[in-house]
Amino acid sequence: MGGRAIEPFLRDKKTGQIGAAVQSHWFSVGSIVSWAEAGVGAIATQSLVNVSFGPRGLELLKAGKTAQEALSFLLAEDEGREFRQVAIIDIQGNVAVHTGKKCIADAGDHKGENFSVQANMMLNKDVWPAMAEAFEAASGPLAERMYTALQAGEAAGGDIRGQQSAAILVVRGKPTGKIWEDRMIDIRVEDHPEAVREIGRVLRLYRAYEHMNAGDLAIEHGDEQKALAEYGAAQDMFPDNLEMQYWQAVSLVNIGNLNAALPVFKGVFNRDKNWIELTKRIVLNGMLNADEETLNKIINITE
């Protein structure tokens, strides 16, 4: 398989994040190319992929090997090394890259400060330099900066075969001891003719659901005003999303603003009647503070 990937380590005192982003004309590229672990590093194994380079490389880094030491060890044991393209970045920001002599042209790599970009089977040699330049010029969160690099690679020519899948993976720089918190972003587009554009949409949706999750947490803590603000922020990003509309309406009821909630409920119910049944159920578990009269006004709003 061909494709392009970027792995950066940001020496950001606030985040310290490590990540990898990849795009290829191959199904489910994120499941085999990108590997990262909090407090350890990131690996992209591509071209004719040796998938074992991912988990084995991370184990070598955890054992104290530098990026270059880990890469040298993996390649020494691999008879197909000249068909491989692999990059490793460790937690110190050291970068090691290998582009085998038998990788399909155009193929190459670029090492920058705390990041690596590599590509093979590209339309031209402009792709990976364009990605590197875009990443270095970008600002904002790591995931968005990597996405900017993927966009730049596509604009420069991209994969000679076109697009199919893409992925963005971001982990913490320091492990928390809670695996579910260490992996911050893990999003994939498995099969799409415009995979780069689609992974951008999914990333934006991920950011919207960060607000949704914060809203859920606020409800759990009894802070309805906070919940309303978070659900509203999510809906501003995706105004047609029923889930976001619905929970904003629930929060409006819970702070005593039934009149504002009713037209939102009506719009949701008119598109999907199943939300009416859900509304009855969340009264029973206390998530919707509605007496019988209020509930009837809500569920009959479509009439």
Image: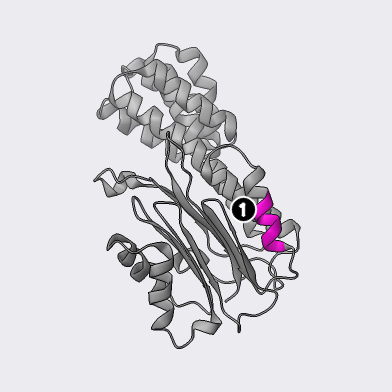
112 within the magenta span: no
Residue nearest the viewer, comparing 158 with 241: 158
Q: Residue at x 64, y 42 (%)?
A: 138
Q: Position of residue 264 (x, y in %)?
A: 53, 25
Crowding near the residue tagged with mark 1, few <14, some 14–19, many ≥20 C-alpha atoms within 10 Å: some
Above or below residue 173? Residue 21 is: below
Tell whether 221 sits left or right of 20.
Answer: left
Q: Position of residue 191 (x, y in %)?
A: 57, 65
Residue nearest the viewer, comparing 153 with 180: 153
Residue nearest the viewer, comparing 46 with 209: 46
Q: Is residue 264 visible?
A: yes
Q: Number of callouts in the render?
A: 1
Tell whether 283 sits left or right of 229.
Answer: left
**Identity of the amino acid at label 1?**
Glu
Residue at the disc numbered 1: 198
On-image quarter of the N terminus: bottom right
Q: Residue at x 29, y 60 (%)?
A: 62
Tell whether 59 sits left or right of 104.
Answer: left
The segment highlighted magenta reads 127-133
Report the magenta stretch's main SS: helix
